[in-house]
Image (spheres, rainbow, N blue to C red):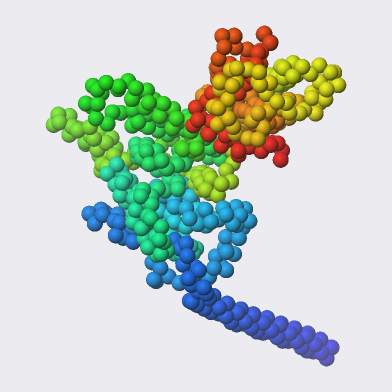
Amino acid sequence: MMAASSSSKSSSSSSSSWMAMAAATATGIMVGITVTVICKNRLDNHATNNINNNLHRPPRHHAKQNRGMLPQPQNQHQDPSSSSSPSSSKPSSLPRFPLELRQEQLSRHTLFFGPDGMKRLQKARICVVGAGGVGSHTVCSLIRAGIGYVRVIDFDQVSLSSLNRHACATLAHVGTPKTTCLVEYAQQLCPDSQYLVVEGRCDMYTAETSAQLLDLTAVVASQEQQSSSTSSPTPTPKWDWIVDAIDDVPTKAHLIYTAWKMGVRVVSCMGAGGKADFTRLHVSDLQSASRDPLASKLRQCLKKQILQPQQPQQQQQQGDNNKTNNNNNNVEELFQNAEQLAIVFSSEKVVQKLADLTPEQKDTKSSLAASTRTDGQGSSSSGSGGVADEYGAVPGMRIRVLPVLGTLPAIMGQSLAAWVLTELAEQPFQPVTGERVGRNVRNKLIQKLQTREDRFLRRMLEQHNITDPKRVEQYKKDGGFLQWPLSSSSAFHQNQNQIQQEKTDEHDDKVWIGPLQIDADDVEYLMEVWRNRCAVTGARLGTVLELVRWDEGRLSTCDNLILLSQHAKQAWDQTTADAKATTTTPATHPSGDDNKPSDGQLPIGRRGLDPQVRRKIEARLATCRVDSRA
């Protein structure tokens, strides 16, 4: 009994000691957590006070900071009768943002674009039409990058269903205009209007509101007034870029057509709904956008808008045929010029179709159709159009829901912003085309170029009477410059003044002969640079294309080679004879093996091109790398 009693006492004392230790440990942990929380709160309060002090502290060198300041647009440029309600940050109610913090905020972009590029971004004025899944991501990327002024135009409000793809909207924004949501986001990102102004226009872009919504006169006047500029105001201020993120085809066409007439560059987004494969996204001209239904409809709508006569009476006047031809040329120029109109599109086939009408919408459609049959006076908006008027956000708009995977509009919106930013900062890139060139095509292109260069080398050596095998082998192996052998040509003297005025570089009176400077990998890069099109005519890959040296006075590197179709190449070589030989001697092509060329029949084909085409090609060549692997 005594042994059992002692055993129970020892076990009870042991358990009580363990309980005391556990309680002490728990107490210590709670005390440690409490102290940590108190210290953290004090540190957070200290940091917040420092930031607030910096934000409200009067800026140093106030006169310097006001210089080049981007002003807050005033409401005076608004039409009082308009329903638009511009919203933007007010400089008087927002704190100053220290210059040091703004520089740190944009430091990574400054490293990428350089100081000069960032200055161009700060001075830029961008208009984004459409603030949905695509446009909102574009706006957020632009204001994060350092753009100084952005105007956002959209009539719609944030809904619950749009939260899966909008860039910055939350539950708190449901029911508010999408433009207001983006303006508030911009104020949280940079509250100082001297660095960033985002103006929201909650209005629908139409043919009637276009002039008012795209007007920049009051903004530029306010900028010049606040910056105390003494220079004369710009007579017709223009946007640096217009971003089209509209999903309605006629509205897109009107915006692009208006920007084209204004001389403003546009980047436009095609269909993002019902697709998912982001690896099939491309940037190209409108003509090259393939397997995209929206792009096809946009081409038709734009063509009608450009070709339609402004006044019916003008069709009866003399010279209408010339006007029609000019309009056709304008259509081709707009469709094939990515410098004026760049398109972001997906070549993926739509994997999800439009959702069906709801039972209520079907009942409405049936009742409208019945009333039309009874009255016999149904308008064009009856049937499905009447349903759109009943259930659509605005009359005539699509009401069937389009399935959207939120990631694809975000990527396309970011792509629009990337195109604008790199173009503004003068660091453009050459997008990869949707058509991949096979190995056999690349080999044929380089073989034809090699054959052309070899023939040209032999012709030049014959013209200079270079027959020494060692010198010939040296030119074939190492290359070198030779003078144009035209001093004895009367044709050359007749055209010398014109040629002298069109000199483009220091080697204009010389030619370079030697080994080919590119390989098969460079050919693929060049196909991407020229987007598988003829540099002169814009002919696509369906035609036979060849590589030709742009300037015979320079090496055959990537930045001196262009793609030409067979027809353009023949005109290129024929122009050579016409430009420097006015005699009746048959023209000899430098790529042919026929009669030996006489003086004045050497290739200067680029001088036979239209000056505008030449400038366009030279601008594209300026963006090329000498070596595709550089």
93 w.r.t. 564: above or below: below
Q: Quadrant of the C terminus?
A: top right
Residue 487 position within the rendered picture, expressed as x and y whole percent measured from the top left: 66, 21
Residue 277 position within the rendered picture, expressed as x and y whole percent measured from the top left: 55, 38
46 relative to 352 in the view: left or right: right
Residue 17 position within the rendered picture, expressed as x and y whole percent measured from the top left: 75, 87
* Residue drawn at x 48%, y 71% as measured from the top left: 63
Residue 420 position within the rendered picture, expressed as x and y whole percent measured from the top left: 51, 46
Q: Residue furthest bottom?
A: 2
Does residue 275 show up? no
454 w.r.t. 106: above or below: above
Q: How many marks?
A: 0
69 relative to 483 in the view: left or right: left
Question: Looking at the rendering, which quadrant does residue 44 occupy?
Answer: bottom right
161 w.r.t. 69: above or below: above
Question: Looking at the rendering, which quadrant does residue 76 occupy?
Answer: bottom left
* Residue drawn at x 49%, y 68% as measured from the top left: 65
* Residue drawn at x 24%, y 30% as measured from the top left: 311
Give 533 or 595, whichever is nearer the viewer. 595
Q: Residue furthest left?
A: 375
Does residue 20 show up? yes
Q: Residue furthest right?
A: 470
Give 17 or 630, whichever is nearer the viewer. 630
* Residue drawn at x 86%, y 21% as measured from the top left: 470
Give 429 or 349, whichever is nearer the viewer. 429
137 relative to 573 in the view: left or right: left
Q: Quadrant of the N terminus?
A: bottom right
